Image (cartoon, rainbow, N blue to C red):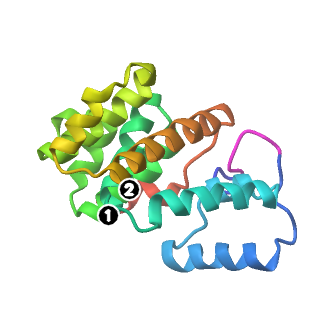
């Protein structure tokens, strides 16, 4: 079985057959991406868990927000880089490359985001996400004020915190289960 067929180190086979709505979701992924992400396959041993995961992911990463999709993906990669989450560095690094049109930006987010050519808004956002990841207990009003000073709204700050929090959780699950990124991600947007 290849890595793309076995999404984690755990022996948790997908529900077979998948419910119609789940199969439709996977078909849309195949159509748009050319494959079904292994994270979805990993959760598909339990459709309720898969639905909870995709519901939160879709809300945080795809719903309307004052944060662009690129900004949310940048947060995902910075958090995943700090946590050394192989799956998310590869998958979301590819998304940063694609959304930005700058392969070097995706690489910088994975290796050292502070070396990227970022504006004050992105720098403040990613610094906040980094602090949430490394020492969330030390967040104080000055940290939120720094975000407001570069134009983030209260709702934007909420979204930054939630995207960072979500990836801190999912990074730990992916690492603990040996989740493998789809090989397709490695060649995307280069």
Magenta stretch contains residue 7: yes
Q: Residue at x 55, y 55 (%)?
A: 182
Residue 109: image location, x then y, percent: 29, 42
Res 1 visible: no
Q: Residue furthest right?
A: 16
Image position, residue 160 (x, y; %): 38, 46
Q: Position of residue 76 (x, y in %)?
A: 42, 46
Residue 73 against residue 116 in the figure, above or below: below
Q: Main secondary structure of the magenta part?
A: loop
Q: Secondary structure at mark 2?
A: helix
| Residue under pointer 2 | 94
Answer whether labels 2 and 1 touch (C-beta < 8 Å).
yes
Q: Is residue 128 left or right of residue 150?
A: right
Q: Which residues are magenta?
A: 6-11
Image quadrant holding the C terminus, namely: bottom left
Residue positioned 73% across, 53% down in the render: 43
Badge 1, how many Cα within 10 Å: few under 14, some, many 20+?
some
Which residue is at the front of the view, 68 or 98? 68
Residue 150 left/right relative to 86 = left
Name the residue: 38% across, 56% down.
Answer: 94
Q: Work out whether 184 lies above or below 167.
A: below
Numbered disc 1: secondary structure: helix
Task: Give the left or right position of residue 148, taking residue 96 as reference.
Answer: left
Q: Does the magenta-highlighted stretch encompass residue 103?
A: no
- What number of labels is visible? 2
Residue 27, horizontal then vertical, whole percent = 64, 78
Q: Which residue is mark 1?
A: 98
């Amino acid at each position: 079985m290849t890595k793309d067929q076995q999404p984690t180190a755990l022996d948790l086979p997908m529900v077979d057959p998948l419910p119609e709505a789940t199969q439709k979701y996977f078909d849309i992924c195949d159509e748009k991406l050319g494959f079904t992400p292994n994270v979805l396959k990993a959760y598909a041993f339990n459709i309720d868990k898969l639905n909870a995961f995709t519901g939160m992911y879709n809300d945080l990463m795809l719903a309307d927000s004052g944060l662009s999709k690129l900004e949310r993906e940048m947060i995902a990669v910075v958090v995943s880089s700090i946590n050394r989450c192989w799956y998310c560095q590869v998958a979301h690094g590819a998304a940063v490359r694609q959304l930005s049109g700058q392969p070097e930006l995706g690489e910088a987010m994975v290796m050292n985001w502070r070396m990227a050519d970022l504006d004050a808004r992105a720098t403040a956002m990613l610094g906040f996400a980094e602090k949430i990841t490394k020492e969330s207990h030390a967040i104080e009003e000055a940290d939120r004020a720094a975000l407001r000073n570069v134009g983030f709204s209260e709702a934007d700050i909420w979204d930054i915190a939630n995207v960072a929090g979500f990836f801190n959780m999912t990074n730990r699950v992916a690492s603990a289960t040996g989740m493998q990124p789809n090989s397709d991600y490695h060649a995307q947007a280069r």
